[in-house]
Image (spheres, rainbow, N blue to C red):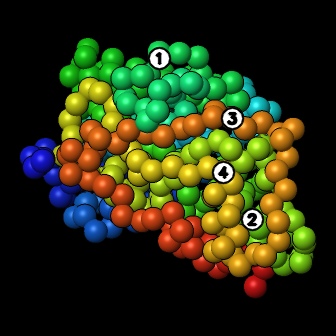
């Protein structure tokens, strides 16, 4: 399927909100090959949870395009223990950026959601139209509700004000500049950090939360960034678009792959007293594939690249 050129980034001021996070920094990296001016704002410059600060910064910088990659994110433990932060911070960030974008005449905005927006027991693979058809996964409901609100917010501004605000729903991401703090990280970076520590210590086993049976889909963050730029340039619709690989592995298979990449020979000890989360989360990426975009980085290759970055940046030298 040939996708028509919809929006040119050439000569545009492009704000990447959340540029220091994994996906935001990947978008910044990807945009360096575009003929555009990349705008960023650190926490010391703008608190995205404060409406007045966001409005003042946007009125001063006047971006043409915005990627909303800023969010309060974390794994199961973080979601379970800090629910107020996950719902308030994400609601405030998205509301402030979306409204200020409309008020300041932003030409195009892309809002990043998450695959956790879908019902816990949604039919697999999950198509975009299963949103709001069933109960959410309890362990990340606070984050999911905020992201769903962000989707509806963008759609509302599109309907009422004619804003070209689009929506991308990436699957589980990993890659450069990931969060390796075991109290707040997602499963892939947590596994890398745990297995690396076990290898250094010569430990006979490494603990893995849950049964190892749940299935997950993983997308390398650099691929996700490429998809975001692709959608910014080539998509202009109200419906959100799934972004993923269309393939899945069990958590056990993920852990085994990490062990292989790191060269750890010990055994995996699954702690079934810890929560599994949703039993399966696989996106149907047919809509994006029909537009002409598919992921390029396989899981083992991506984990090797992520581990190389971890060794270079997160471990003592």
Q: Nearer the viewer, mark 3 or mark 1?
A: 3
Residues at circles 2 and 4 in contact by the CB criterion of under 8 Å: no
Q: Name the residue under label 1.
A: 132
Q: Which residue does the image show at 63% across and 26% down from the upper left?
A: 137
Q: Which of marks 2 and 4 is in front?
A: 4
Q: Disc 2 to disc 4, how far (Cα)?
A: 15 Å
Q: In the image, is 144 to the left or to the right of 244?
A: right
Disc 1, SS:
loop
Q: Nearer the viewer, mark 4 or mark 1?
A: 4
Badge 4 crowding class, 10 Å Cα cut-off, few under 14, some 14 to 19, many 20 or more, is many
Residue 235, given in percent of the width and then of the height, sits at 21, 40
Q: Mark 3 points at which residue?
A: 277
Q: Which of marks 3 and 4 is nearer the N terminus?
A: 4
Q: Earlier in the sequence, mark 2 or mark 4?
A: 2
Q: Disc 1 to disc 2, how far (Cα)?
A: 35 Å
Q: Mark 2 points at which residue?
A: 193
* Viewer-side residue, 149 vs 265: 265
Residues at circles 4 and 1 in contact by the CB criterion of under 8 Å: no
């Amino acid at each position: 399927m040939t996708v028509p050129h919809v929006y040119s980034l050439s000569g545009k001021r492009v704000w990447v909100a959340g540029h220091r996070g994994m996906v935001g920094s990947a978008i910044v990296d990807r945009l360096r090959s575009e003929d555009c001016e990349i705008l960023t704002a650190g926490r010391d410059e703008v608190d995205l949870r404060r409406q007045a600060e966001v409005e003042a910064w946007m009125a001063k910088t006047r971006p043409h395009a915005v990627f909303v990659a800023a969010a309060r994110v974390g794994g199961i433990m973080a979601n379970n223990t800090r629910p107020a932060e996950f719902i308030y911070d994400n609601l405030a960030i998205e509301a402030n950026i979306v409204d200020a974008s409309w008020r300041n005449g932003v030409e195009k905005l892309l809002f990043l959601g998450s695959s956790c927006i879908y019902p816990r027991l949604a039919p697999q693979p999950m198509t975009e139209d299963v949103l709001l058809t069933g109960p959410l996964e309890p362990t990340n409901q606070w984050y999911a509700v905020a992201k769903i609100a962000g989707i509806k917010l963008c759609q509302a501004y599109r309907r009422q004000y004619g804003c070209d605000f689009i929506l991308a729903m990436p699957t589980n991401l990993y890659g450069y500049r990931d969060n390796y703090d075991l109290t707040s990280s997602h499963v892939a970076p947590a596994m890398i950090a745990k297995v690396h520590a076990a290898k250094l210590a010569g430990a006979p086993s490494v603990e893995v939360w849950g049964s190892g049976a749940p299935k997950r889909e993983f997308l390398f963050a650099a691929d996700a960034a490429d998809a975001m730029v692709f959608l910014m340039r080539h998509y202009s619709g109200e419906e959100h678009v799934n972004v993923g690989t269309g393939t899945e592995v069990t958590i056990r298979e993920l852990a085994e792959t990490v062990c292989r990449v790191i060269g750890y020979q010990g055994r995996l000890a699954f702690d079934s007293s810890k929560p599994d989360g949703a039993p399966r989360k696989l996106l149907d990426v047919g809509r994006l594939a029909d537009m002409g975009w598919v992921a390029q980085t396989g899981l083992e290759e991506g984990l090797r690249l992520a581990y190389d970055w971890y060794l270079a940046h997160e471990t003592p030298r």
